[in-house]
Amino acid sequence: MPGRCPEGATQAGAATLTALGALVLCLPVPSGYGRHLPSPAPALPARAAWFLQELPSFAVPAAVLAQQTRAFFGAPGAVLLGLFCAHYFHRTFVYSFLTRGRPFPISLLFRGLIFCTGNGFLQSYYLVYCAEYPEEWYRDFRFRLGVFLFILGMGINIHSDYTLLQLRKPGEVVYRIPQGGLFTYVSGANFLGEIVEWIGFASATWSFPAFGFAFFTLCFLGIRAVHHHRFYIKTFKDYPKSRKALIPFIF
């Protein structure tokens, strides 16, 4: 639905995501939640915090879609935004009610809310009002590869999250070595899945905002996987020596 696209604003939003990703790589420590929480701070229970943080990433695109005419829903932009909503529906309404993580700092929750709201609006507004796809886009290699990677990555992410959930009984905050699936090869299997997912989304949309988000995800979750890997090695003397941080057999 071209014609209402503030091209400069969407490019600025995508550039901001890219810059934030680069900034994350410069930080000496990962974002301070979970096992990397530096000190006691005002916090919410993990389930409530994850629900509140992830909700805008689903609600904002869903609200944008709800304003469109029925004719729009056959367009590639609607399908692609539907994939975005599917990921965050699971994160908001399924994962957040199953997680058994540590309390989540309110300061980080506030930052997460701002990010999820802004990114949700950027991706949805671009796909609805800016993106122009040819009629044969559904047959384009970039679209097909991207959707395949998105579904593959989402499957890896969900399977890995559930593997981690099974490591704790209700009320426990201990850490154990995850086993099975891609955890056989990497410490950050859940992170790898989400990175693959958003790289696929970027390919399928072939848009600057989606590539900016994919780059941010790679930086934010990639560095977190590295710190998780170091934590496991330091904590468990019997941690598998062949296991890498993020990319099987390589890194």
Image: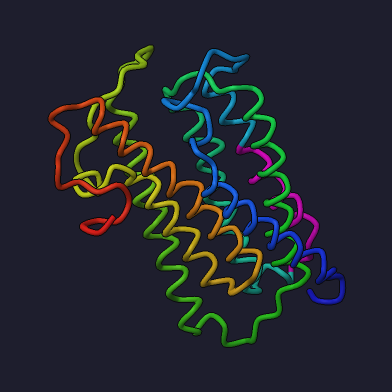
Residue 176, horizontal then vertical, whole percent: 25, 25
Residue drawn at the location 70% of the way across and 56% of the way down: 16
Toward the viewer: 249 or 25? 25
In the displayed structure, would residue 245 be above or below residue 9?
above
Q: Quadrant of the C terminus?
A: bottom left
Residue 177 in magenta stretch: no
Q: Quadrant of the N terminus?
A: bottom right
**Horizontal side, residue 56 vs residue 186: left or right:** right
Toward the viewer: 102 or 93? 102
Residue drawn at the location 47% of the way across and 66% of the way down: 200
Residue 102, horizontal then vertical, whole percent: 46, 20
**Horizontal side, residue 136 vs residue 209: left or right:** left
Residue 56 in magenta stretch: yes
Toward the viewer: 67 or 2? 2
Residue 227, horizontal then vertical, whole percent: 38, 38
The residue range painted magenta reads 54-70
Q: Main secondary structure of the magenta part?
A: helix
